[in-house]
Amino acid sequence: MARLKLVVLISGRGSNLQALIDACAEPDFPAEISLIISNRADAGGLTRAETAGIATAVVPHGNYPDRETFDSALSATIADAGGELICLAGFMRVLTAGFVDQWRDRLINIHPSLLPAFRGLDTHARALAEGVRLTGCTVHYVRTEVDAGPIIVQAGVPVMPDDDEATLATRVLAAEHQCYPLAVRLIAEGRTSVHGESVTISGPTNCPNTLINPSL
Ligand code: GAR
């Protein structure tokens, strides 16, 4: 069976990109990365792409007069690469409604919280300030509202009493690196379908026990 062609969009260090690169290196993984696009020439993730021998493109947002023309350039680059699923992996630009609609249900994002809690930036600092016992990460289809859209995979991560932003971010990031390849696999295997604002997953999902924090 043909592998689903991914285009991964990054802005920074690219650790989630690395998780996808590693997953795609597995012989039975049902997707492959056709192109990695960064809006910043200095993104650390570009080095990961080069090490893995995957094509890269830099589309610098500063070269475009507005979001519409930047997004059009992105779209053309993705289409030229034959992209079938766009994975936002730490891509820190808000996308226009035109772009989101063009790629509807073929555009996914990872976010470091249990959405709909803590949309936006500084998720871990805000989770700590609110005193939540559980936080986590979410992979979701992208809609025009930022950090919103039908949820594909979530992982719950406990907040420990002595956590600071850095320790919590590290624990959540480890979960992100498991969730993103899983979400891509489910999509590439044709197991996800979007109904309104939620996603149905067909076949076995092997969900572990509920996480309670603190445990009894
Ligand atoms: C990740 O934690 C990702 O969830 C977050 O940016 C980080 C990128 O790290 N994305 C967002 O906050 C999007 N709203 P990475 O470059 O190492 O993958």
Image (cartoon, rainbow, N blue to C red):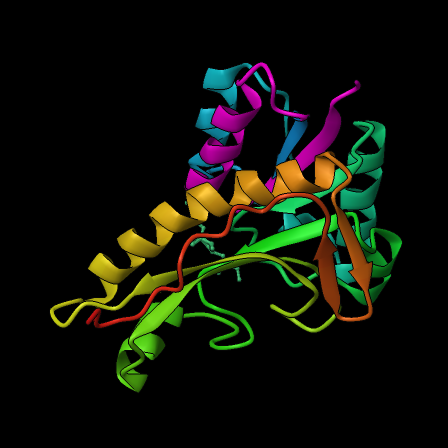
Left or right for 10, reference 176: right
Residue found at x 45% / y 70%: 121
Question: Is 55 drawn above or below residue 188 in the view shown?
Answer: above
- Viewer-nearest residue: 138 or 167: 138
Left or right for 213, reference 105: left
Image quarter of the N terminus: top right
Instruction: Check the image and name the residue furthest to the bottom.
Output: 130
Residue found at x 43% / y 42%: 177
The range drawn in magenta is: 1-30
- Viewer-nearest residue: 171 or 68: 171
Residue found at x 73% / y 67%: 198
Residue found at x 34% / y 76%: 127
Q: Is residue 12 visible?
A: no
Query: Magenta includes 28?
Result: yes
Question: Is 8 drawn above or below residue 172 in the view shown?
Answer: above
Q: Position of residue 167 (x, y in %)?
A: 21, 58
Query: For residue 178, which quarter of the picture?
Result: top left
Numbered disc total? 0
Q: Position of residue 65 (x, y in %)?
A: 75, 58
Left or right for 199, reference 114: right
Instruction: Check the image and name the residue furthest to the left.
Output: 162
Image quarter of the C terminus: bottom left
- Viewer-nearest residue: 127 or 190: 190
Query: Magenta includes 37?
Result: no
Q: Position of residue 133 (x, y in %)?
A: 29, 76
- Viewer-nearest residue: 106 or 154: 154
Q: Is residue 98 visible?
A: yes
